[in-house]
């Protein structure tokens, strides 16, 4: 049985600049996980008070939490310090799929 997981990212203040050389590889990992049916949605979130992106969330649906951890461990944003903190949270969906 599949479970929903959120992979939460906190990012550096200069996220947009620092992600640029890593973005192609990051997106490759995202599209591959999506094609396998593991990654459902993802994107960065924005803090309007600071006028900056300050994190991201990736929504996974998988029977194995290790799939989410493996993704995070391979992500060049994490490896290269653009992401300063990762958290994996099981998500109990109440409304929706």
Image (cartoon, rainbow, N blue to C red):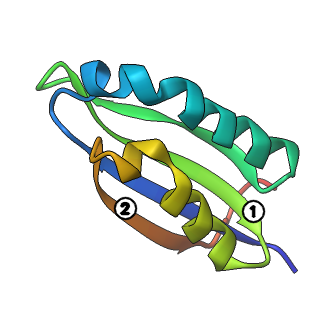
Image-quadrant location for residue 45: top left
Q: Locate the C terminus by quadrant.
A: bottom right
- Count of marks placed on residues: 2
Query: Would you say 66 lies left or right of 53 here?
Result: right
Q: Position of residue 47 (x, y in %)?
A: 23, 30
Locate residue 48, reporting x and y percent: 21, 23
Which is more toward the observer, 77 or 38?
77
Residue at point 74%, 36% (across, down): 31
Q: Position of residue 88 (x, y in %)?
A: 48, 69
Given residues 10 and 80, the one toward you in this image is 80
Q: Residue under circle 2?
A: 86
Disc on res. 51:
none
Q: Residue at x 39, y 67 (%)?
A: 87
User: In what element is the residue under mark 2?
Assistant: strand
Estimate how packed mark 1 is, as few (under 14), some (14 to 19) or many (20 or more) residues with alpha carbons within 10 Å: many
Task: Tell me: residue 63, above or below residue 85.
Answer: below
Q: 10 Å neighbourhood of mark 2: few (<14), some, or many (≥20)?
A: some
Q: Residue 61's mark? A: 1
In the image: residue 43, left or right of residue 60: left
Q: Nearer the viewer, residue 22 or 4?
A: 22
- Residue 95 falls in image quadrant: bottom right
Q: Secondary structure at mark 1?
A: strand
Q: Quadrant of residue 65?
A: bottom right
In terms of depth relative to the viewer, which is nearer, 96 or 36? 36
Horizontal side, residue 14 vs residue 76: left or right: left
In the displayed structure, 42 sits above or below 46; it is below
Q: Quadrant of the N terminus?
A: bottom right
- Residue 17 in the image: above or below residue 28: above
Q: Can you say whether 83 is above or below 16 in the image?
A: below
């Amino acid at each position: 049985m599949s479970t929903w997981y959120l992979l939460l990212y906190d990012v550096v203040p200069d996220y947009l600049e620092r992600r640029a050389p890593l973005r192609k590889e990051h997106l490759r990992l995202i599209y591959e996980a999506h094609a396998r049916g593991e990654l459902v949605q993802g994107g960065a979130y924005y803090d309007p008070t600071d006028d900056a992106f300050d994190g991201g969330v990736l929504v996974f649906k998988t029977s194995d939490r290790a799939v989410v951890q493996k993704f995070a461990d391979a992500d060049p944003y994490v490896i290269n310090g653009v992401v300063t903190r990762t958290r994996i949270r099981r998500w109990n969906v109440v409304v929706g799929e």
